[in-house]
């Protein structure tokens, strides 16, 4: 038996790039002495490399250099899928989009490169409206450069997990897709209403 099922694997680079561009907040995992260190931060794709920045006081910063190995997870939309959505008898399931990447990381030891990278990342994240521009002469930017480390990850392994009811009838696939959209829009509102303190 093959696992994960082939129909839940999507290794089309165009699709994987789109997940990274649309959901750039990554889970970055390093291992030191059999202990995982985990940080959540945005990563920007440049060619076949991921570019990121980390606070120098984060313990994981020391592992983001010298070609150390890292694992990177990106998460797309996800939701519970009720059997009531399908025209045939099914069991409850969960649909999701996840990326599992592995790579070698190295530090970029240049304040000029770091500064330009922060400007470039801000420009990317402000797309499409660009309501804010991080200017090169911003004094806050210059004051904080010594507290941020830049790194790049050369990706060595790509794995796309797109579990979207692909093994169901076309009408059921369509229903599952609509539920993924509906549930994500509704769940964010309901969640924030419960946890956001005004």
Image: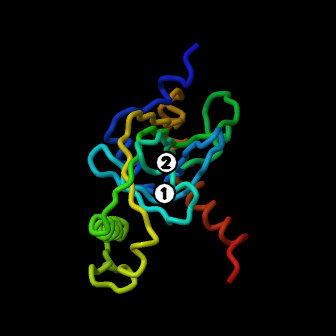
Q: Residue at x 45, y 34 (%)?
A: 159
Q: Residue at x 67, y 28 (%)?
A: 89
Q: How many marks?
A: 2
Q: Earlier in the sequence, mark 1 or mark 2?
A: 1
Q: Is residue 76 rendered to the left or right of residue 133?
A: right
Q: Is residue 55 rendered to the left or right of residue 111?
A: right
Mark 1 touches mark 2? (CB < 8 Å): yes
Task: Indicate the quadrant where residue 148 lies.
Answer: bottom left
Say if residue 8 shows up in the picture. yes
Q: Is residue 3 rendered to the left or right of residue 11?
A: right
x, y percent for residue 85: 62, 40
Q: Residue at x 56, y 21 (%)?
A: 3
Per the image, label 1 sits on a secondary structure element best described as strand
x, y percent for residue 86: 61, 35
x, y percent for residue 94: 63, 40
Q: Quadrant where the C terminus lies?
A: bottom right
Task: Indicate the quadrant where residue 140 lies.
Answer: bottom left
Task: Indicate the quadrant where residue 115 lies.
Answer: bottom left
Residue corresponding to mark 2: 74
Q: Is residue 135 above or below residue 72?
A: below
Say if residue 21 shows up in the picture. no
Which numbered marker is on residue 25?
A: 1
Instruction: Determine the CA span between mark 1 and mark 2.
Output: 7 Å
Q: Residue at x 42, y 77 (%)?
A: 144
Which numbered marker is on residue 50?
A: none
């Amino acid at each position: 038996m093959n696992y994960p099922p082939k129909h839940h694997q999507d290794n089309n680079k165009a699709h994987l790039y789109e997940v990274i561009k649309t959901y750039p907040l990554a889970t970055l995992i390093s291992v030191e002495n059999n202990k995982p260190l985990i940080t959540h931060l945005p990563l920007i794709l440049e060619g076949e490399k991921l570019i990121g920045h980390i606070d120098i006081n984060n313990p994981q910063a020391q592992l983001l250099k010298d070609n150390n190995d890292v694992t990177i997870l990106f998460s797309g939309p996800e939701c519970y899928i009720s059997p009531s959505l399908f025209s045939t008898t099914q069991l409850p399931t969960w649909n999701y989009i996840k990326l599992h990447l592995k790579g070698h990381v190295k530090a970029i030891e240049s304040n000029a490169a770091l500064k330009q990278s922060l400007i470039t990342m801000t420009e990317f994240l402000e797309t499409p409206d660009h309501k804010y521009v991080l200017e090169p002469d911003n004094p806050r930017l210059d004051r904080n450069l010594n507290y941020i480390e830049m790194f790049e990850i050369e990706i060595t392994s790509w794995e796309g997990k797109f579990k979207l009811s692909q093994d169901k009838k076309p009408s059921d696939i369509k229903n599952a897709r609509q539920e993924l959209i509906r549930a994500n829009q509704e769940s964010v509102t309901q969640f924030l209403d419960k946890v956001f303190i005004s």
